[in-house]
Amino acid sequence: MKKCDRCGELVDKAYGTTAEGEILCFPCCARKDEEELLESGNSRKVLLYYDFEERATILGTLTVAVIKNWPGTLKFDCFKFKKGKHNIGDERIDFWFKGPDDFVWYGVHYGKRNSIVHCKRTKKSLKKAL
């Protein structure tokens, strides 16, 4: 068994490691990823992925696009996504979601062989809109 270097929780097989060699439990992975996103305003240091989840509603099943980190402990529901074509990657998907700082974040995915999304904070604040 190993111990999380941030919170001290014992982890068995499910944990993440940083570039510096820190061992992190999955909740601490989410906190570290969120800190990186807030600090940089983009996902250059954090690998984010997209997924489509089925959600039950009173009107039936709804498919929602979700941006998440690798263990799935940090998730952002997209309020808009658009599928299109790309000249090299064949497929392109654009995503818009509320980020960790109440700004609109934009992400783009290219190709069919992975689910990596490159994201960045936009200038539009959702706090001002409310």
Image (cartoon, grey):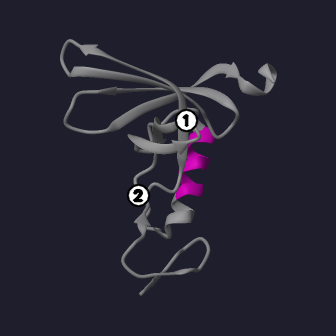
Q: Is residue 83 or residue 127 the one in the foreground?
A: 83
Q: Is 107 left, or right, of 130 in this rendering?
A: left
Please provide percent x and percent y for residue 67: 47, 40
The quarter of the picture where the C terminus appears is top right
Please provide percent x and percent y for residue 102: 70, 33
CA separation in Å, label 2 and label 1: 45 Å
| Mark 2 Cα shell of 10 Å, populated few (<14), some (14-19), many (≥20) | few
According to the picture, the residue beneath numbered tag 1 turns out to be 59
Q: Is residue 38 or residue 105 the one in the foreground?
A: 105
Specify whether residue 49 is in view. no
Residue at (61%, 48%) from the top-left corner? 35
Q: Is residue 59 or residue 4 the one in the foreground?
A: 59
Residue at (46%, 45%) from the top-left corner? 68
Q: Is residue 12 or residue 77 the one in the foreground?
A: 77
Q: Which mark is residue 88?
A: none
Magenta-drawn stretch contains 32: yes
Specify whether residue 97 is in view. yes
Q: How many marks?
A: 2
The range drawn in magenta is 30-39
According to the picture, the residue beneath numbered tag 2 turns out to be 19
Residue at (19%, 36%) from the top-left corner? 113
Compared with 79, 35 (above or below) is: below
| Mark 1 Cα shell of 10 Å, populated few (<14), some (14-19), many (≥20) | few
Secondary structure of residue under mark 2: loop
Q: Earlier in the sequence, mark 2 or mark 1?
A: 2
Question: Which image quadrant is residue 19 in?
Answer: bottom left
Residue at (53%, 51%) from the top-left corner? 74
Name the magenta segment's main secondary structure: helix
Magenta-drawn stretch contains 86: no
Mark 2: amino acid: Ala
Q: Is 104 left, or right, of 68 in this rendering?
A: right
Please provide percent x and percent y for residue 85: 26, 14
